[in-house]
Image (tube, grey):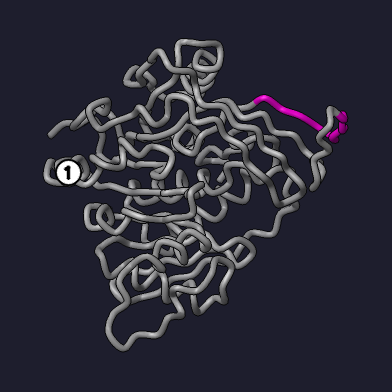
Amino acid sequence: MARDFDLLVVGDANPDVVLSGAPRGLAYGQREQLVSGGDLVLGGSGAITACGAARLGLRTAFAGRVGDDAAGRFVLDVMAGRGVDVSHCVVGPRPTAMTVVLADGADRAILTSPGCLPDLTVADVPRGLARHVHVSSYFLQPALAAGLPGFLEGERRAGATTSLDTNDDPAGAWDGVAGVLGEVDVFLPNAAEALSVAARLPQPPGSSAAAAGPPGGHPEGVEAAAARLGALGPVVVVKNGGDGALAWERGSLTRAPAVPVEPVDTVGAGDSFDAGFLAARLRGMSLPECLRVAVTCGSLSTQAAGGTAAQPTWKEL
């Protein structure tokens, strides 16, 4: 089947207000606190991944929902300006999601008003559009999540490959992902997400509970979690912060070291990592090469405020 795009990203898009040097404790009682910097940038894991992929030369489309408001127009204008086709994004009556990021060095707190994100369903997503379909922010879009297994099965049956980045679960429940992973070719969690999702899987008889340890566990726990998730079918690619990244495929583990950079802003680094991995994979590169490209893209993206300003081109990469 001829497909118009290399990549279709399905997921979230919203403005991010990023405040740098935010205090760890907020002073209520109408006290005003000053921070070192502030930026209004494109946010949403799906939107950032789409922009990173387009920057790397992929013909990229985005499918999601925004509101008929200033925030929605901002989101669509920024994505279109970065070469992403947004003609399949639904503009609806509920307001666009909004996020405030309180950044403190490499760490951050994220406050999100979901707005129209829960309204997105698989009925909003075009079929047969791209060689690869990537889904972001599983837990922010429960109606989409409910229909994903059947949708992804249909895309794979029609010849597309698929990937998923759940991102964080605000509820902390981490339910439902196992039912999707059998239709996913590449699963792209960070270490905390991999541990949390693996902890919800049924424990195999006689197995150690290492993989079900808490987020931030030791490297062996992350490896075991990747293996248990990979047993459901996908290549599991884990972003592991200062330890770089690792990938589990068919019983084999591949690693890539971190790239030493002094981050300006880590917002969206994982989404730029996803874009790099998918761009390399769609170019037919080997798993170790894909992992190195992904780590480098994620690292370079931290060199400017927001998730998209420092995303590299393929030549820069």
Residue 202 coordinates in the image, percent (x, y): 30, 71
Please, what is the three-letter code of the amino acid marked with disc 1? Answer: Gly
**Mark 1: few, some, or many residues within 10 Å (few <14, many ≥20)?**
few
Q: Quadrant of residue 178?
A: bottom left
- The image quadrant of residue 228 is bottom left
- Report the residue at 45% width, 16% height from top: 67
Image position of 28 with respect to 255: above or below? above
Residue numbers of the magenta segment: 31-40
Inspect the magenta stretch and tell me whether residue 28 lies in it. Answer: no
**Dominant secondary-structure state across the stretch colored magenta:** loop
Residue 91, percent from left and from top: 39, 15
- At horizontal 82% and vertical 43% (from top left) the residue drawn is 23
Relative vertical location of residue 143 with respect to residue 153 in this rendering, above or below: above
Q: Nearer the viewer, residue 264 or 207?
A: 207
Residue 300 or residue 41, whichever sits in front? 41
In the displayed structure image, the side of residue 172 where residue 264 appears, left or right: right
Residue at image point 49% right, 70% down: 255
In percent of width and height, residue 82 lies at 51, 24
Instruction: Give the quarter of the figure containing the N terminus.
Output: top left
Residue bearing mark 1:
150
Quadrant hosting residue 154: top left
